[in-house]
């Protein structure tokens, strides 16, 4: 019963804030509504006993990705008071496509052939179904560092490539500022810096 | 009683909202990128729900990797957006037509 209340409460929050996100003009407000949607989803993930991923969602998504979004919105200096022509023009086709997608998903879920009826009678398992001392994080870690260690390292490489790509894309050298050139600094030799000129002594007249 | 279908319908709703958002917000690429994040969230919810009801942790491993790739995608996407704004002074989708596509 408690699970049902939590589920309906936070799924309503997630859906309503997602709807608000796509309908507000201001991108900062949209980002905050998306954060709210992520928080509600994290609680639903907790309900499904994916504790580690729920925490990761809050830390990585809310803490890093959405802050990145907010920083970009801040940097862009947008003009929010634009004409709303696009919104009404594409509104019907957007709603229609969303409705078609949703009802096709819903239709598949109701089919006998989809095999979904196996799960119809299965309730949400509770914490009591696990042995004492069960840890979701430990289970994930065991799998991640044994069976999926190769994929894990590829993911690490992917993140490194993403860092390099993001920095090299946005890096810009301003022509007016003065820079140090470490290459020239290191390769400097004292022979190039000082020139000793031998001046013959002239006799006083 | 909460069954798997409840979670799948919620994920379907979130994904449809994200899809509608991509069509509706033609003025702002940032909100478009946020809609992509919303769709990825719905996919992750599907994976976690199946992982719970099948008693299999490997679905959560997959979500872990999706989160990694989505973070990388958001970083590069926003970097491209910043460069684009510097060049064109606009992030309106309708104005980005220099390739005549």
Image (spheres, rainbow, N blue to C red):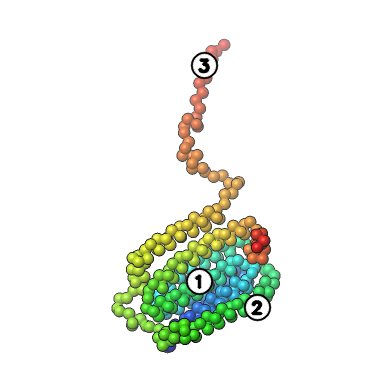
- Chain holding disc 1: B
Residue A52, given in percent of the width and then of the height, sits at 40, 72
Q: Residue at x 38, y 83 (%)?
A: A125
Real-space Cα distance between discs 1 and 3? 84 Å
Q: Residues within 10 Å of mark 3 (few under 14, many from 20)?
A: few
Q: CA distance from mark 3 to mark 2?
A: 95 Å
Any part of residue A16 in sight: no
Q: Position of residue A194 (x, y in %)?
A: 50, 29
Q: Rate crowding at label 1 as few (under 14), some (14 to 19) or many (20 or more) other CA atoms within 10 Å.
A: many
Q: Seen in the image, is B62 located left or right of residue A100?
A: left
| Residue found 65% across the figure and 59% down from its top | B99
Q: Are marks 3 and 2 in contact (CB under 8 Å)?
A: no
Residue B22 seen from this side: yes
Label drawn at residue A201: 3
Chain label for disc 2: A
Q: Identify the residue at the far left of this view.
A: A132
Please give the label number shown on residue B40.
Answer: 1
Residue toward you, A181 or A153:
A153
* Circle 2 residue: A92
Residue at (66, 59) in percent of width and height: B98
Q: Out of A130 and A111, give the one closest to the viewer.
A: A111
């Amino acid at each position: 019963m408690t699970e049902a209340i939590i589920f309906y409460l936070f799924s309503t929050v997630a859906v309503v804030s997602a709807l608000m996100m796509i309908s507000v003009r201001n991108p900062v407000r949209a980002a905050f509504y998306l954060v709210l949607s992520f928080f509600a989803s994290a609680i639903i993930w907790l309900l499904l006993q994916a504790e580690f991923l729920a925490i990761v969602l809050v830390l990585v998504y809310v803490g890093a990705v959405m802050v990145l979004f907010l920083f970009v919105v801040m940097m862009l200096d947008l003009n929010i008071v634009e004409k709303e022509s696009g919104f009404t023009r594409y509104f019907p086709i957007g709603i229609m496509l969303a409705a078609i997608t949703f009802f096709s998903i819903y239709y598949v879920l109701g089919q006998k052939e989809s095999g979904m009826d196996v799960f119809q009678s299965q309730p949400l398992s509770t914490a009591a179904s696990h042995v004492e001392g069960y840890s979701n994080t430990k289970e994930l870690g065991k799998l991640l560092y044994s069976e999926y260690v190769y994929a894990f390292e590829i993911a690490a490489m992917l993140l490194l490539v993403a860092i390099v790509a993001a920095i090299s894309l946005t890096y810009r050298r301003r022509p007016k500022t003065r820079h140090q050139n470490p290459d020239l600094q290191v390769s400097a030799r004292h022979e190039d810096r000082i020139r000793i000129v031998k001046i013959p002594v002239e006799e006083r007249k | 009683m909460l069954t798997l279908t409840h979670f799948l319908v919620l994920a379907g709703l979130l994904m449809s909202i994200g899809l509608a958002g991509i069509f509706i917000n033609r003025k702002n690429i940032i909100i478009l990128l946020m809609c992509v994040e919303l769709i990825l969230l719905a996919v992750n919810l599907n994976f976690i729900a199946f992982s719970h009801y099948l008693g299999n942790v490997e679905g959560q491993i997959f979500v872990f990797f999706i989160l990694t790739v989505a973070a990388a995608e958001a970083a590069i996407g926003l970097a491209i957006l910043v460069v684009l704004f510097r060049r064109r002074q606009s992030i309106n989708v309708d104005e980005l037509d220099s390739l005549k596509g």
